[in-house]
Amino acid sequence: MTARIGVVTFPGTLDDKDSLRAVRVAGAEPVSLWHRDKDLHQVDAVILAGGFSYGDYLRAGAISRFSPVMETVIEQAKAGMPVLGICNGFQILTEAHLLPGAMLRNNHLHFICRDQKLRVENAETAWTSDYSAGQEISVPLKNMDGRYVADERVLDELEAEGRVAFRYLDMNPNGSLRDIAGITNAAGNVVGLMPHPEHAVEPLIGTGRTDGLGFFTSIIKKLVNA
Amino acid sequence: MSLDTVKHAAETPDVAQPWKELGLKEDEYARIREILGRRPTGAELAMYSVMWSEHCSYKSSKVHLKQFGEKVPVNDAMLVGIGENAGVVDVGQGYAVTFKVESHNHPSYIEPYQGAATGVGGIVRDILAMGARPVAVVDPLRFGAADHPDTKRVLPGVVAGIGGYGNCLGLPNIGGEVVFDACYQGNPLVNAGCIGVMKHEDIHLAKASGPGNKVILYGARTGGDGIGGVSVLASETFESTGPAKRPAVQVGDPFQEKLLIECTLEIFKEKLVAGIQDLGGAGLSCATSELASAGSGGMRVELDTVPLRDSSLSPEEILMSESQERMCAIVEPQHVERFLEICEKWDVIATVIGEVTEGSQLEIFWHGEQIVDVPPRSVAHEGPTYHRPFARPSWQDALQADDAGKLARPANGAELREQVLKLVASPNQASKSWITDQYDRFVQGNTVLAMPEDAGMVRIDEKSNLGVAMATDGNGRYAKLDPYTGAQLALAESYRNVAASGAKPLAISDCLNFGSPEDPDVMWQFAEATRGLADGCLELGTPVTGGNVSLYNQTGETAIHPTPVVAVLGVIDDVNRRTPVAFAEEGQLLYLLGDTREEFGGSAWSEVVHGHLGGMPPEVDLGREKLLGEILISASRDGMIDAAHDLSDGGLIQAVTESCLRGGKGARLVVPDGLDAFTFLFSESAGRAVVSVPRSEELRFNDMCGARGLPVARIGVVDGEEIEIQGEFSIPLSELRTAHEATIPALLA
């Protein structure tokens, strides 16, 4: 079978086409999902792509979280469907309380776009099984509101349960607590991160590396072997 | 105040009108009365005042700009020429590309964030209005001295505005420039360029034909921002004592623009429009008069149907408002329903505000009463033309006689070393990544090259790997010394940058930034620069597809350096063959292509070491530029070079430093026979590039250059962790990196 992976377009989503392309490059069938449509069109997994949904007005992800499509995404994610939130998608997942914590404005107050080194801390989630724990990868990072925060209790819990999925290496680009770049829920089906693996799936484009492809091959293997 | 209707205007010929406050000259006002055979209504006066402004009518510049239409090189690539929103060129495989550079200088000084943001928004809508999907943006920027306190106000605001708007639109920012010079103090240059891609059959033109077709205004509501932006801001010199001009600056909403882009592309896909125009400078006045003028002429608009943000706006203000994120489409009646449906899908407000009529007049009504009745051509295309006096400035000869060749040169290797470090750390030569890292260069997933590469490059077809490249260049110091040569040097450098990336240069767009046209010195600079550019384009075979003129960039009596900025667009059949600047492979051979002469007039070295500007700029040989370009493209296509970097400001040492730092590898260089180390490192002779050649390709590469008559010299090898100039000095890469990368954050962060 071919895995069907949906990518949601909200008003202001920017990296939806990139995510659809990454899904295709990895070998699955990309499916475009629309924010007003509750129907997920029989996809096996969902990606919430990067961008500035609703202009990031009010708070990044705060409005999108209430869109019709999210009602179904939240319900299905709780039932175990794999969901990946990239950048703005990560912000939406925290606003939807599918993942704990929140994102604040970068500590230096500037938008930052760079090639960012990460360490994969948890290689057992639905989206990271093709990496090995401790593996170092480099993918583009680009955001305004990327500083991950949560209270100490939540941070300790995340660490203790191995739910810190990615950590920034070499430099912390936004002041995220404990260098956290991405986290997973306890079940490992919902993963969110600020950097953009979908921009690192072709050798020639972007940073010239394919370190991000593993996210998409991980989920395809999981879905096809399921 | 009662409504000033057409009828009322005819009955009250002697009412005093505020033509002067609106920026019109006395003879211009008289001409409007002559055209209409009566005094204009308030609404008509508002329209003429914005459309006849310098910014919209090019009244001072057009007698010179017409050369771009007269000296047109033979070039099959041109599909749509000057005159439309943006020119269109054929890039093969059924694709067409449209591109343009525009200025948003004056608003960006008044309100840096919004000025720069709406500059990006405006150029993107221009490209969209041609039927193209915008695929990338570039931003050539110029500011006052890097250490001037006001630069710290203007630059961060401009950069944040470009980032804040562009990043939110989802367009990769792939190139541009950042230049500092005291001459731009008080008159920063914020130019913005955009590239769009479409299929040949999808080209849309801004015209309203077909009586009965509906005029639909869609996008943001109209507010009170930007009223008179083109006439008040862009067409006059700043005075320190005048009233605050901030209300004349527009305020942008990039989220709305993103929706407008997606909505418009979906509308194009279903072929629902007969004509389309974006609303930028001069707002509805411009869109309605230009659409009507380019079509059959007649149009009727019910102005009171325009959705407003502020219900107290008068009809004059609605006509003049430059509220952003608005477009105007001409739609056949049977397509209106579907058009509105698509707008609703994207939460974009769309309103039928009028229709194309049989007649030849543009008629505008306000609650049933007629307030405008004008021949649209007289507003849009028949504005005044000035033959401004111009004369070679009295100081020009003395400036050119002040030869940079007589400046004290470094006496030994130690002094050379010191000056190299000073050069690469100077604000103009230092790394600009603190700035460009605030722009998203990855979005859309097609970016092949972005700054600090020589040219930005994006893939436009995922299957065939067809790509386009663009570089923008300008050097106000060269142009000040000799505007004709300076304009050609800007063209040559931009052309060379595109060729160095492996793409074939096809056509250009220009943004001509000058001082006041009322000053004969400035007008001479303008006349010389346009003549230089037109002659240069003819010789290089790259037509001017369009562009923009920004005048009045001066404070009091002091004008900026004449600053023609040239954007060259190129095409590459397979982006896999692109050439980066990085020296990444140890052992590869470094070759210098072209002739190096003792040319230091206007150079970065003369500025950084001596604070000097004088003499003549480097010589231009466009035949040589063309040959160099062909060699760079062939070598890239046939895999003979792995890296290339053009030589321009800062000379060879600047280029080698950038390429070494980018690749993380050092270089050992030998001064070639016939040159001294100083000239070798710092000369800014044009028509040159440095390339990195794999040893296996050396013979083939040399043979090709020899056969085609391009002088080349083997100058060294990629090696080690330092840059060594044999027998002179060496500098560790780490020391160069610190010098090159610390300057801008230290000044601005």
Image: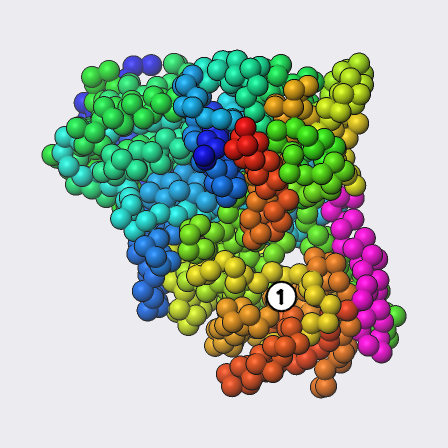
State the SS at label 1: strand
Q: Residue at x 44, y 50 (%)?
A: B462
Assess whether residue B729 is covered by the magenta stretch: yes
Which residues fall within the magenta stretch? B720-749
Residue at (70% x, 42% y) in the render: A137
Q: Amino acid at mark 1?
A: Ala
Q: Is residue B89 left or right of residue B433?
A: left
Residue drawn at (79%, 27%) of the image: A178
Quadrant in the picture for residue B186 = top right
Rendering coords of residue B680 (x, y %): 72, 76
The answer to whether residue B262 is visible is: yes
Query: Percent position (x, y) of residue B317?
Result: 38, 24
Q: Position of residue B581 (x, y in %)?
A: 63, 61
- Which image quadrant is residue B25 in? top left
Instruction: Name the residue at the front extreme.
Output: A225
Q: Residues within 10 Å of mark 1 (few under 14, many from 20)?
A: many
**So how many labels did they put on this image?**
1
Judging by the rendered image, the residue that carries numbered circle 1 is B643
Residue B282 within the segment the image draws in magenta: no
Q: What chain does mark 1 sit on? A: B
